[in-house]
């Protein structure tokens, strides 16, 4: 597995995402519920151990009580994936999420993409640097996520942070509410993917590319070939998996990714 560096942290270029573990399918309420039923604590820990075996060393996970409980058990049992923590507006304000990340010794923490989109729309970007400073004060690497290219255009001019998470798509507007609405009609447009990946080439920070499969809508081989063509030497990709009916999905995705990187 190829590696990149963000600050003093070494990350596998394929990073495991955890939205499916928390029931965020981006495919409607029924699929959300199916994911929650499927991903018991035992199954999540099994997936984390499989990731280790495949050479993955990093997990991106929400700072919610469910994820933190699973990680507590996983680490007590010898788990080694480092946690890049994501704030989550549905369970508390940003500072509270940052403190929770520190309590579980997260290696890094980043501001949720919906929050960043919302702050941009509401003219509240003065909230960002103090949150980044607080993350760093607590000894973690600090970053931001976003679905809107404007978030990163603003960050390049105004923000001092360690990394970005850039979403390939902007599925739903977060102008009024930063939280994900599971009942909303989502939009996965090629022009959004192109706009974000074009912008990534100009950014000054390492980028973790995410939602590259359009929440299961894109053909994996095409998606990873596209990622490989856009990934800079400083960048990595984050992918969540749903193994119900596809127990080898993680291994297959890693193989497709590594093949695409080799051919790029």
Image: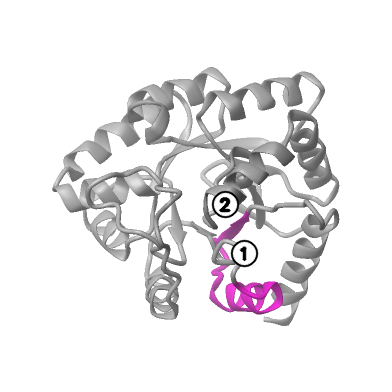
Residue behind mark 2:
25
User: Residue at coordinates 56% horizontally, 29% vertically from top-left?
Assistant: 106
Which residue in the rendered view is the most extreme toward the left? 123
Percent of width and height locating residue 218: 61, 73
The quadrant in which the N terminus is found is: bottom right
Above or below residue 190? Residue 106 is: above
Q: Is residue 97 magenta?
A: no
- Disc 2 and disc 1 in contact, CB within 8 angstroms: yes
User: Residue at coordinates 80% horizontally, 66% vertically from top-left?
Assistant: 255
Highlighted magenta segment, given as a residue range:
218-239
Above or below residue 46? Residue 16 is: below
Q: Is residue 231 magenta?
A: yes
Percent of width and height locating residue 176: 22, 48
Above or below residue 222? Residue 41 is: above
Above or below residue 76? Residue 177 is: below
Work out whether residue 114 or residue 264 is closer to the camera in this orientation and state it: 114
User: Residue at coordinates 53% horizontally, 48% vertically from top-left?
Assistant: 29
Residue behind mark 1:
216
Work out whether residue 49 or residue 9 is closer to the camera in this orientation and state it: 49
Q: Secondary structure at mark 1?
A: loop
Q: Is residue 252 left or right of residue 24?
A: right
Q: Is residue 199 left or right of residue 234?
A: left
Work out whether residue 105 or residue 170 is closer to the camera in this orientation and state it: 170
Work out whether residue 6 or residue 45 is closer to the camera in this orientation and state it: 45
């Amino acid at each position: 597995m190829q590696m990149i560096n963000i600050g003093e942290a070494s990350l596998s270029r394929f990073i495991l995402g955890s939205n499916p573990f928390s029931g965020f399918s981006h495919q409607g309420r029924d699929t959300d519920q199916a994911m929650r039923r499927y991903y018991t604590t035992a199954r999540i820990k099994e997936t984390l151990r499989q990731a280790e075996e495949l050479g993955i060393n990093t997990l991106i996970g929400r700072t919610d009580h469910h994820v933190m409980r699973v990680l507590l058990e996983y680490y007590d049992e010898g788990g080694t994936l480092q946690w890049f923590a994501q704030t989550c507006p549905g369970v508390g304000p940003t500072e509270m999420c940052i403190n929770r990340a520190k309590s579980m010794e997260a290696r890094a923490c980043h501001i949720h993409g919906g929050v960043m989109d919302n702050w941009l729309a509401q003219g509240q970007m003065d909230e960002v640097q103090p949150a980044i400073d607080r993350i760093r004060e607590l000894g973690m690497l600090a970053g931001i996520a976003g679905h809107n290219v404007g978030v990163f255009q603003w960050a390049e001019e105004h923000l001092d942070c360690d990394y970005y998470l850039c979403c390939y798509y902007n599925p739903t507007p977060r102008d009024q509410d930063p939280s994900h609405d599971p009942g909303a009609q989502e939009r996965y447009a090629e022009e959004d993917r192109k706009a974000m990946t074009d912008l990534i080439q100009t950014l000054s920070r390492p980028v973790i590319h995410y939602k590259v499969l359009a929440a299961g809508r894109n053909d994996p081989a095409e998606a990873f070939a596209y990622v490989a063509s856009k990934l800079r030497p400083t960048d990595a990709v984050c992918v969540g998996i749903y193994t119900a009916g596809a127990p080898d999905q993680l291994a297959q995705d890693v193989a497709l990714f590594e093949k695409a990187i080799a051919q790029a």
